[in-house]
């Protein structure tokens, strides 16, 4: 039940981030729903295909479609309160990658994968919905810019396996890893920490 709750919360966060981007691009209602949908399930769909979990998650359980539909309605109805698109997008996107990183890691563990593969799967789950969203909206995906994004997912996923070695229950290690992903992303943006820019290095 706990893992399903985390998955649903991640779906809501990413769906709303998709709604915000779509409205910023002034898409129609259908466009808003499509962008929200691919943002919410894009990474998870790719993950499930790679580990052979088919039909993919959202096809097996209609609750994901209903949750995304509800998030779209929420985003549209409260668009005036979410008028600060950049800040709202950043917030929901950051929460989403924290939650979805650990959903991906857990799926990898359930499939019997090695920790490094689980971390890669978690990073992919958290990142690729946003990649698809940005490409469809004619933006350079955040993951390919200098911002700390995928790095936060990798460090958070790795921290989970380190936390599991401590004398604490797995659920606390799980929650701790989620908070680490969110914390690293927040810290990087607030204090403008970024990866080296290869072009600046060359100059």
Image: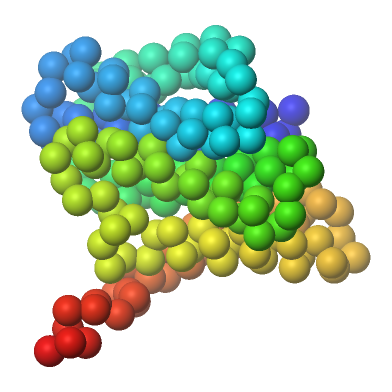
Q: Position of residue 52 (x, y in %)?
A: 64, 28
Camera sees residue 157: yes
Q: Position of residue 79 (x, y in %)?
A: 21, 28
Relative to 145, residue 191 above or below: below
Instruction: Please state if 27 lies on the left or on the right of 182 as rendered.
Output: left
- Name the one closer to the observer, 171 or 82: 171
Q: Position of residue 107 (x, y in %)?
A: 68, 38
Q: Residue at x 48, y 63 (%)?
A: 152
- Quarter assignment of residue 49: top right
- Name the one closer to the observer, 107 or 27: 107
Relative to 7, residue 155 above or below: below
- Name the one closer to the observer, 180 or 199: 199
Q: Position of residue 153 (x, y in %)?
A: 51, 58
- Name the one closer to the observer, 105 or 184: 105
* Quadrant for the N terminus in the image: top right
Q: Residue at x 90, y 65 (%)?
A: 167
- Quarter assignment of residue 185: bottom left
* Quadrant for the C terminus in the image: bottom left
In the displayed image of the protein, which residue is found farthest to the right? 167
Q: Residue at x 42, y 31 (%)?
A: 42
């Amino acid at each position: 039940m706990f893992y399903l709750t985390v998955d649903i919360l991640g779906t809501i966060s990413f769906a709303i981030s998709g709604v915000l981007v779509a409205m910023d691009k002034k898409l129609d209602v259908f466009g808003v729903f499509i962008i929200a949908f691919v943002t919410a399930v894009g990474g998870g769909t790719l993950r499930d295909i790679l580990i052979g979990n088919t039909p993919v998650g959202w096809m097996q359980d209609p609750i994901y479609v209903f949750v995304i539909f509800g998030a779209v309605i929420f985003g549209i109805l409260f668009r005036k309160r979410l008028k600060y698109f950049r800040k709202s997008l950043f917030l929901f996107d950051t929460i989403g990658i924290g939650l979805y990183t650990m959903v991906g890691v857990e799926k990898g563990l359930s499939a019997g994968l090695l920790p490094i593969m689980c971390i890669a799967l978690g990073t992919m789950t958290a990142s690729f919905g946003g990649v698809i969203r940005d490409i469809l909206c004619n933006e350079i995906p955040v993951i390919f810019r200098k911002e700390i994004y995928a790095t936060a997912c990798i460090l958070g996923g790795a921290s989970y396996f380190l936390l599991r070695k401590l004398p604490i229950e797995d659920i606390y290690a799980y929650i701790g890893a989620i908070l680490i992903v969110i914390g690293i992303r927040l810290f990087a943006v607030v204090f403008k920490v970024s990866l080296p820019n290869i072009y600046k290095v060359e100059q």
